[in-house]
Image (cartoon, rainbow, N blue to C red):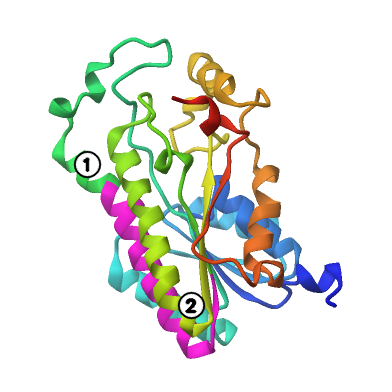
C-alpha cells in the first residue's frame, strides 16, 4: 500500500499552468512548486509571470503565451517539453470574465447584460479564451502526453456550468458549460492513452478575473450570501484539490467535474 507521501507525490513532474501569473492559476503553481514539481507558467502578463516565478523559486519559470494563439502555444509547449524532458501535468486555467449578467446583485434588471446589447466581439472573445483556449491547451497536452506515455490534465471550469446564474455574464455561462462537456468527451477519448482529464469547478473566489469585482461590497455580499459557509474562496482553498488531481491519489478519477464553491450551487435556484 502506498504511503500518504507517495499518494500525493508530484516531485519532479513537468507542470504547465496557463493563466498562472495570478488568481487560481497562481494557486495551482504554488502548490505544485511547493511539492517539488518543475513549473512553467504561461500567461499574457509578463510582469505577473516575473513576480510569480520570483516568489515561487525552485526552478519555476514562465513564458508569455495567449491561449487563443495556436502557433504561440505550440512553441511554448515545445519549449517546456524540451526543458523538462516532457510534460506530465497541465492546468488549463486561463480565462476571462464576461462582465455582468442581466440582473444586478440587488435583483434589478441590468440592460448592459441583455443579449440584444452584447457586442459580438465581446461574445467572440469570451468564447475564444474560455472555451477554444481550453481546446487549444488540451490538444497540445494530449500530443505531448501521448508521446510520454500518459499524464494529467486539470481544467478550470466553474459552477456556472452547473447552475443558472443571472448576475454572471451569459457568454461566460455558455463557455463553461461547453468546457464541462468537452472534458467529459476528452476523458472518453484519452483514457486509453493513460491520460486523465478532470474539471475543477470553483464558485466565487477572490481573484482578478472579474476585474476585482468581488472587492465591490454589493457584489461580494451577494456571493457570500450564496455560500453555505458564509464566505468566498481563498487561494489556499483550491490547493488541496489541485494536488489531488495532479497526483497518484486520483489515479482512478477521470471525466469528473468537482465543485469547490462552499456549497453555493445548492442554494442558487
Report the front residue among 222 and 69: 222
Of mark 2 and mark 1, the one earlier in the sequence is: 1
Q: Secondary structure at mark 2?
A: helix
Q: Would you place residue 267 above or below residue 28 in this image?
A: above
- The dot on residue 123 is 1
- The dot on residue 39 is none
Q: Would you place residue 104 above or below residue 258 in this image?
A: above
Which residue lies at the image location 68% right of the left edge and 26% below the top edge?
A: 229
In the rendered image, residue 193, in percent from the top left (x then y), is placed at 48, 84
Residue 144 part of the magenta-drawn span:
yes
Q: Is residue 247 visible?
A: yes
In the rendered image, residue 139, in percent from the top left (x then y), is placed at 36, 73
Which residue lies at the image location 66% right of the left edge and 22% below the top edge?
A: 230
Residue of label 2:
191
Q: Is residue 54 visible?
A: no
Q: Would you place residue 231 above or below residue 171 in this image?
A: above
Quarter of the rendering containing residue 67: bottom left
Of the residues tagged 2 and 1, which is closer to the observer? 2
Residue 35 part of the magenta-drawn span:
no
Q: Secondary structure at mark 1?
A: helix
Q: Are marks 2 and 1 in contact (CB under 8 Å)?
A: no
Q: Judge the density around disc 1: few (<14), some (14-19), many (≥20) Cα neighbours within 10 Å.
A: some
Q: CA distance from mark 2 to mark 1?
A: 32 Å
Q: Main secondary structure of the magenta part?
A: helix
In the rendered image, residue 5, in percent from the top left (x then y), is placed at 84, 69
Q: Which residues are magenta?
A: 127-152
Amino acid at each position: 500500500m502506498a504511503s500518504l507521501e507517495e499518494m500525493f507525490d508530484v516531485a519532479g513532474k513537468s507542470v504547465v499552468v496557463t493563466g498562472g501569473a495570478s488568481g487560481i492559476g497562481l494557486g495551482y503553481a504554488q502548490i505544485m512548486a511547493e511539492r517539488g514539481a518543475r513549473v512553467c507558467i504561461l500567461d499574457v502578463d509578463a510582469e505577473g509571470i516575473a513576480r510569480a516565478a520570483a516568489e515561487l523559486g525552485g526552478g519555476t519559470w514562465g513564458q508569455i503565451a495567449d491561449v487563443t494563439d495556436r502557433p504561440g502555444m505550440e512553441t511554448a509547449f515545445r519549449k517546456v517539453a524540451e526543458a523538462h524532458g516532457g510534460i506530465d501535468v497541465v492546468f488549463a486555467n486561463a480565462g476571462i470574465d464576461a462582465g455582468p449578467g442581466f440582473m444586478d446583485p440587488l435583483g434589478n434588471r441590468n440592460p448592459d447584460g441583455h443579449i440584444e446589447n452584447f457586442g459580438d466581439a465581446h461574445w467572440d472573445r469570451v468564447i475564444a479564451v474560455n472555451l477554444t483556449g481550453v481546446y487549444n491547451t488540451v490538444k497540445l497536452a494530449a500530443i505531448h502526453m501521448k508521446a510520454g506515455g500518459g499524464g494529467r490534465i486539470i481544467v478550470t471550469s466553474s459552477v456556472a456550468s452547473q447552475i443558472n446564474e443571472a448576475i454572471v455574464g451569459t457568454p461566460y455561462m455558455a463557455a463553461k458549460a461547453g468546457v464541462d462537456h468537452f472534458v467529459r468527451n476528452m476523458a472518453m477519448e484519452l483514457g486509453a492513452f493513460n491520460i486523465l482529464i478532470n474539471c475543477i469547478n470553483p464558485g466565487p473566489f477572490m481573484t482578478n478575473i472579474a476585474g476585482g469585482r468581488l472587492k465591490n461590497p454589493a457584489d461580494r455580499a451577494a456571493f457570500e450570501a450564496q455560500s453555505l459557509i458564509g464566505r468566498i474562496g481563498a487561494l489556499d482553498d483550491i490547493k488541496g484539490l489541485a494536488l489531488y488531481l495532479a497526483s497518484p491519489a486520483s489515479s482512478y478519477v477521470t471525466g469528473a467535474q468537482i465543485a469547490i464553491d462552499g456549497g453555493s450551487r445548492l442554494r442558487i435556484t
